[in-house]
Image (cartoon, rainbow, N blue to C red):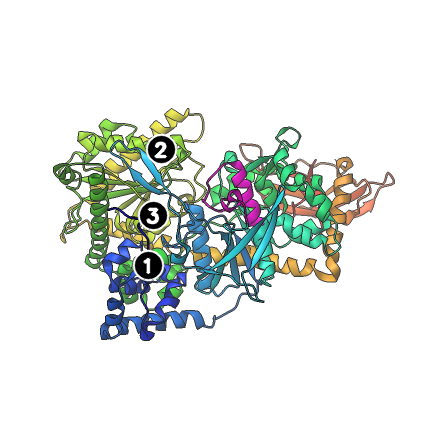
Amino acid sequence: MPGTPFELEVNPTIPPRLARLQELADNLWYSWDRPTRALFARLHPSLWQTVGHSPKAFLKRVHQHRLDAAASDRAFLDAFDRVLAQYDAYMTATPERRDDCGLVAYFCAEFGFHESLPIYSGGLGILAGDHCKAASDAHLPFVAVGLLYDQGYFQQTIDALGNQHALYRDSDFEDLPISQVMHPNGGELRLRVALPGREVELIVWRARIGRVSLYLLDSAVAENSPADRAITHRLYGGDRTTRIEQEILLGIGGVRALRALGIEPAVWHINEGHAAFMVLERIRTCMQQGLVFAEALEAVAACTVFTTHTAVPAGHDRFGRDVIRRYFELWESEYGVPFDAFVALGAEPDLPSGAEFDMTSLAIRGSRFHNGVSAVHGGVSARICAHHWPQVEFSDNPIGYITNGVHVPSFLDPEWHDLFDRHLGPGWAKQLADEKRWRAIADIPAQQFWTARQTLKSRLFHLVRNRVAEQHRRNQGSEAHLDRLLRFVVPNQPKVLTIGFARRFATYKRAALLFEDLDWLAQLVSDRARPVLFLFAGKAHPADGPGQDLVRRVAEVARMPKFEGHILLLEGYDLRLARRMVAGVDVWLNNPIYPLEASGTSGMKAAMNGVVNLSVLDGWWAEGYDGTNGWAIKPVVNGFHEQDRDREEARTLYEILQDAVLPLYYAPGPLGFSEGWVELAKRSIMTLLPRFNTERMLGQYVERFYRPASDRAARFAQDGYAPARALAAWKAKVRERWGSVRIQRIDREKRRIVYGSRVRFELAVWLNGLDPADVKVEMLLGRPSEDGQPHRATAYELLPAARLESGEQVYALELEPDLCGKTEYRFRAFPQHPLLAHPFETGLMLWL
């Protein structure tokens, strides 16, 4: 049509009776309250789908007559009032007990709450979102800080040949559940952060997550250059320059944003190394109060928590020293922050002359509480980062772990709520970690449990049919072929064994391990009496060629005639599809390369919905599997080439499917389904849900990290930061003198004693000017082990005794061993100070 098109958007007026719909749309509480989302969908179901389940976008587009009709519809108003009552009760509830850990500030590069706020890419963001939701549920004083991206992670389509296509769309911020933060004195709140040769202006947006606020920084300001406006344009987009500039804005700009808002956290949490530059800005602030760099570092690190989610060294962000100089050398002249001292915080001793600056190293040196996200990952991280404590055994260094959890209200399907109310009692949702209460799952009648599971699978099948049909037609496939592809996806008869694999398509996750032996796989799926359906979904990063090859490989196998209909590759993996899959499949498949799965949370979400896990014993599953609640693939660890490893673990996978999964699922039963399968699915819920939820996870963060960090913050700030000054001076003294400390044994060694006898051990320690109280000497006593290390050794402290004429300090211990048989003992000495957060914080240790 000729002429110039002009756009005009007409927004409806919300009737006064429904005015609080806008309030509900502006709080991401709806992301885990399904009755709220159902309320919007009820007004106009097709529009709700069109706007991607975004309440705010929905209210801008819904027709006026629907709102007017709803305002006089008694049924709708009753539902509306019930939702408001629940919302008000949630927002105004008084906590049974208030945590005394002070305000926590949680920094992360991405947050995943719901598909209506697309500023996340995967597991890190979903975990961060769940952390915020759990903090809201727990009434924890908590704020979060991130970046607001015009383009969140890409939207994915897959063509007929399995090629992934990444589509980026700018968000309309007026459609997002955010509002711009204004300055207390009026006008926009503006911040400035210096980058080479200019200052970048930032505005701040706020998202409400129940009781928690998330502050998002945005560089798309007219006063900035086009290049600077683009810094926050795309999540994980651009080159290394964009990456470091995003991380500077997040870390430094985030601290300044909180300061401008008058928010003074007691605890600072760096969730992954992207936000570690916050340490530098906080050091600068402390130096303005009269502290020197080393003292300011102690004051800052005392109340900082760092969580790493990466299990491979290459996954940690690094920048060249020349890049760091370009961005930070003026900090020395303008702020007094010594450049070399700052660079040393990110130095990697295994790299030549500090050639690269490592963000994980900055986060570790700038914090005193560090953790991985599962027991396996804690050990992996302790090994990767062992050089920060060079004289300490990696198993003893300060990196611990808190295993991730998932936010149950977000991912437990409502289908379970009535059943749980009847069998667990109405208070179950507030006692998620009570393992005894969850034993009542066993009493749910098998028929009711199976019906719930089939209902969830039916809903998944409806979504799968819609997605596959849309994808197939866009790729110009025929209707006849579509029928072949969907012949097992029958919503009103969801009897087929359905196995799901959905996650990021990275090579270490091995999406194609299932295809290691196609003949064996064909044998497994070819039995018409026991059909199998595999559902694959996930995105590969647009820059990850091998990851995209995996997508193509899944598509290739799915096209083979012997697998048509048995393997479906679903495009557009997002939170909506994830919620349906973790609730609707029968088996959740996960087969990463051990030990590269830091934690994994999708299997936790599946387990709480009665889905059975079949996974490599890595990440969380190494803790969750008990032999009765799923299946485990024992990883092949030593002595195998990677191809042989994959072949061995694939064989285990096929054997489990052939010998255990299929026979159990299709075992005949008097009620028309396998009661053995139901018992296994019940075990999945009752043993895993109470352990792998964010209520437990957050409680551990509070007890192990937040409360101790808050206490240290208060202690270190006393008397003008006198404790920080004292600890910095003590560390400098110890580091200067430790190299000449020496230990020798001066008692007469006994090789055999009678049980009940006492033995005296004496060591002479040359302290090189250190005080005896500066050094702790221990004996580790335990059973010998095959690798030469004490097995479950017990530490006994040797106390200062006499001084020798030579100047050496004697440390002594009298002990009556309580073990019989052969034992082994060793001696070690290390610096000690009452202000250390961890006994081995200095990384210095001397063994005899």
Foreground residue among 691 and 493:
493
What's the amino acid at mark 1? Answer: Glu
Residue at position x 55%, y 53% in the image: 202
Q: Residues within 10 Å of mark 3 (few under 14, many from 20)?
A: many
Residue located beneath label 3 in the image: 574
Foreground residue among 648 and 98:
98
Which stretch is magenta? 224-251
Classify mark 1: helix, strand or loop: loop
Residue located beneath label 1 in the image: 9
Classify mark 3: helix, strand or loop: loop
Does label 1 or label 2 sit earlier along the sequence? 1
Does label 3 or label 1 sit earlier along the sequence? 1
In the picture, residue 565 is in which quadrant? top left
Does label 2 or label 3 sit earlier along the sequence? 2
Q: Nearer the viewer, mark 1 or mark 2?
A: 1
Residue located beneath label 2 in the image: 548
Left or right position of 58 against 184: left
